[in-house]
Amino acid sequence: MKIPLSWLKDFIDLNGLTPEDIARKLTLAGLEVDEILYVGLPMPVYKEGEKHEFKTNGIAWDKEKIVVAEIREVKAHPNADKLTLLDLFDGQQEQVVLTGAPNIFHLKGAGKLEKPIKVAYAKEGSTLYDGHADEQVLMTLKRAKIRGVDSYSMVCSEKELGITDESDGIIILDDDAPVGMPLADYIGDAVLDISILPNMARNANVIGIARELAALTGRQVRKQVDTYTGKQAGNGTRNTQHTTPNLQPVTDLVEIEITNPELNPRFVAGLIRNVEIKPSPYQIQRRLKLAGIRAINNIVDATNYAMLELGEPLHAFDYDVLAGRVGQVGNLPHKKIKISTRAAKDGEKLTTLDGVERKLTSTNVLVCDEKGSLSLAGVMGGSESEVSDSTKNILLEGAAWNFINIRRTAKQHNLPSEASFRFSRGVHPSLAELGVKRGLQYMAEWAGGTIAPDLVDAYPLKPKDSVVDVTSQDVKRLLGIDLTLEQIAELLTRLEFKCQITNNQLQVTAPPHRMDIAEGVIGLADVLEEVARSYGYDNIPTTTMADALPPQVGNPVHEWEEHLRDLLVAVGLQEIVTYRMTSPEREARLRASESYVRIANPIAPERSVLRRSLLTSVLEIAEKNARAESIALFEVGSVFEPNGSDLPFEPRKLAIVMTGSRTASAWDTHSAKDSPHFDFFDMKGRLELLLSGLRLPDISYTAAGASTALTSSRSSFGSANHLHPGKSAEVKVSGQAVGVFGELHPLAKEKFEFGDSPVIIAEFDLDLMRKLNPTYGIKAVPETPPIYEDIAIIVDDSVEANTVEALIRQTGGKTVTDVRLFDVYRGDQIGAGKKSLAYSLTYQSDKTMTDADAAAIRNKIVKRLEQTIGAKLRS
Amino acid sequence: MLDKLKEIEKSALESLAAITDQAALDSWRVAHVGRSSPLMQVFAGFGKLSKEEKPVVGAEANRVKGALESALEEKAAAVKNAALAKSLEEEKLDVTLPGRSVHIGRLHPSTQQLRRVLAILAEMGFQVYTSREVETDDMNFQMLNFPPDHPARDMQDTFFIEADGRSDNPILMRTHTSPGQIRAMREHAATNPQNPPPIRIALPGMCFRYEQITARSEIQFNQVEGLAVGKNITFADLKGTIADFVRRMFGEGARLRFRASYFPFTEPSAEVDVECFVCGGKGCQVCKNSGWLEILGCGMVHPVVLQNGGYDPKVYSGFAWGMGPERQLMLRNKINDIRYFWGNDVRFLEQF
Ligand SMILES: [Zn+2]
């Protein structure tokens, strides 16, 4: 919300406080100032190295050069039809000024003006915004000749002075503007742009901010000069100034019926007759504009001005339209106008004043008369009864509405407005009466007219002012500061709480404009927050918790996953984190799932469901990075499996994708293109390191084939159709399948945009893996020298390597400490259907072994291989 | 004979002096100290010498032999050094050529930052508590004192999940990690409902907001919250704990300030600003000229939340604070586009 300081000064003395001081106090107290906009007042000058505190913007008006002046005569320009020459007095001397302003043009050639026009006059050398530039560009007024006439100064538009971006016409000041006064002293201002959080909704108005500042500075909110002199509802004092006793009181003309007080706790209406609709005084327009509200006419401006000042949104009806609808004529009604409020019926229609016919639901609340609906309560008026240029008599509504209905209605019809902003956050019903009185008063001041006596006031649901008991111990226990009851009372009284000390406690009553203070233990927290704010957060000490430290038990699941991440990084994989939201179509590139957890309000069709396949997410990122020479990515995260209408399952998964160069290219080795590509065994090697790092025992790899359906308690990797049938494997730990890996099936790969190199993928179920028991302990490092020996055997091509290795290990016993396959050969030398497997064996025992010892074991192994799988030793 | 030896020595040393390479040195060795060299011939003809000549010639021949050998040794060292110097000269690298790289793995920057934050919290006694990403409206909002239609819900635009028959308590993507506060409190309270134990936990995890994806806004982001609940926890303790955390996180000299703020699940609430570490508080683009960076939100746990967690607000109190690891990284590393994080371009990831 934008608050001009000049307006704030109507309600509080701000002497001695700079705009920055004010902004700082408000910001620390929870009313964050986002920006200070200077509109005329001197701007702060920061020295080199000095701290800025706020984002600042705007322009200062030079007091010597920019002053109030009066136009005394408007003359034609000798050489230009569209320009006029102004005879103007700036308080010191007469000046001739050139202007093309359309709002002065009609006076051209009218001779000496009967009533001079007050304007903002900028002398030679003034710094202003360029009125012709699209944006705010500073310029300095220089002497020039325009069509043969000397021009050295100007009368200013709002754009040139930084008030609005309106450049079409000059500012016409109010008649009482003092000629010769520096403009900065007359209307110079600074505007605070304040964020209003939901708990501060009560302060979305000038008086609210003044109230907070009063509490923060120990000053007083200025006694509001209440020039409203209409008879106050029920208290019998009559007007003297704007109302006429002979007029019928509004209570004789209008009655209110509230059908549901929960929806509409209060409805107040007042009447003003014989207004003259015209522009508001310039001072008022300027304040409204600085606050971000368009100036329309004196009646609409009065409702907006009163709303910004007090926080009560008002609605003005054309009284004669209402009277006409029920056949009331003149001052002698046949019958009263009967205004009622009720929930709309589903399907009911109303044309709002923006001209849109709106289909309503029972959430919407309507203000009606006997003929039908008049306005969408608290959100927008109806078009029929709105104020027009010919309106004479105004019925002014101030009401309180249920914030939930207003909130829903504004959302439903997409009608955010100043009124709905306030009503949807709760406006205290006490403001309805104050608002109507203030609105009528401003109308009378700016539009003439007479206020009819009395107000109609239906107030069926008066909120109770909350009462909370506070003790010094409460303050100590929750805020950690020692305050006496008197000190607490002082802090709260500043914020207009009523405080009464009895025995050892303080009874606190919330002020009548506040709806955010509860009672009981919640009310206590509400009040203590106000104590803390009033005391100043900065003044509260910083202490170390005295409360006992709970037992430190750690989080094994989290720690296990972090360890897993470390291992994955150690084997050269880059971690990624991807979006949880995807679409079935995106996942179908790899494998489709039948059911998904669906987003009811997706931001885009490609983010319509929660992912079921972590691997697809990682593949998509690998694809995006496909131009990199080497891609080795992993993600650890949840997938989401539907669970009827209950919360979905969120099993944890690991997915890995590798593709591209196995090694990094360098200038003297190979190009990335010639480097060997990642293949099945690059992945397998990493997985072996990973599983041994997790200390998982008894790991086996079996060909996945096309039939693999790895299932877990709830989840499934699905059929492994996306894997190359000959280059994929299932990983088991202690007989429990925990993951699959292998080369992406060529048909699956076709659906992605990858290069030539194979894409190697792996997917693990972390919930299963985490539950497996690791084994700890290490093998002793032998001190005796080992004997190394190579043997090559020829076997049928169908014999699997792990069969051969198992036989070697079984036969060799514990003396054979390592069996490493170092070559596989197929070819003419050994004949078709055969392969040669070359192993490097390591023999080692507690005692130093001889070559003869090794030979004996080797012979045993070869014999076993010959007998069992028909192997032949290759010579 | 002695003259001959002198002659042998002289000519050998002369020819040795001219030698500069190993090959010439090898032939010199053969020619002058080899088996058929003149010097060795002298030794071979030793038997023919008279009794008187033998000791004199023998001594002189041995002296010459020693002299030639030590000269050879010296020359050999010189030749080797010269050769080495030459090869060192020739083996000069262009040290500006690029180094030979290896592919290494890295953690995602968000994980790295989460770890930094969690490590500090662990030192302070706050242990990790993780909870689910898809939540009920109840857990994400109502239990945390956001009643339906509360204006504060506007602060957290929400993704809802399609689910039949749950209009009272829809399923949604959690908008913050705070539902974990309720889950954790309930778990702790269940262990001793009459006298629930104190809590100090850190709640990390991914959160979701209904936003358009732009340079400034994302549909998902990580959050870490700290939560302390006990019988003697005050707002002053909150300030002390946060000051401690900020010191550990941003350095000893980091100035900070507490501003009153609003969160439905804490009261009193505060926003904490740390002095801009980019400009030192002078004002810059990063801090929007304010000199301060908003880094975390905090407050005393709202009595409604304590109650919903099974802790009696008349007896217990607590505080919570929350922050965004991605935001911290963006400030620290001057990242101006939040989409980098889940875009996962390896050229971005490699820089962490
Ligand atoms: Zn800065």
Image: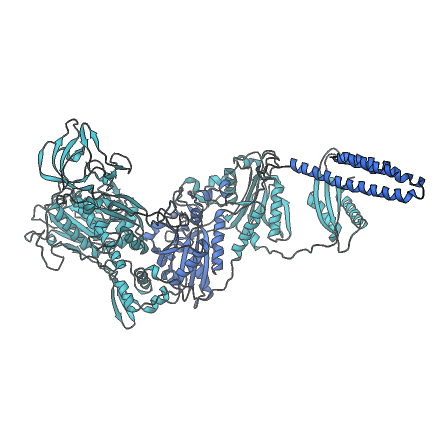
User: How many numbered dots are placed on residues in this image?
Assistant: 0
Q: Quadrant of the C terminus of chain A?
A: top right
Q: Residue furthest left?
A: A246
Q: Nearer the viewer, residue A131 or A788?
A: A131
Does A104 sit left or right of A53 as displayed?
left
Q: Position of residue A225 (x, y in %)?
A: 15, 55
Q: Is residue B132 visible?
A: no
For the residue pair B318 and B84, the one nearer the viewer reads as: B84
Residue A64 vertical placement versus A696 (above, below) = above
- Residue A544 visible, this orientation: yes
The residue positioned farthest toward the top in the image shown: A79
A685 up-or-down from A437: above or below: above
Q: Position of residue A701 (x, y in %)?
A: 63, 46
Residue A205 at x, y percent in the picture: 24, 52
Q: Nearer the viewer, residue A695 or A496?
A: A496
Residue furthest to the bottom in view is A503
Q: Chain B colour?
A: blue
Q: Going by the image, does A525 lie left or right of A100?
A: right
Q: In which quarter of the view is residue A464 placed?
A: bottom left
In the image: residue B19, left or right of residue A624: right
Q: What color scheme is it?
A: by chain
Q: Position of residue A747 (x, y in %)?
A: 56, 35
Left or right: residue A798 versus residue A708 is right
Q: Colour of chain A?
A: cyan
Q: Is B96 located above or below residue A811 in the figure?
A: above
Q: Could you say which quadrant of the image residue B316 lies in?
A: bottom left
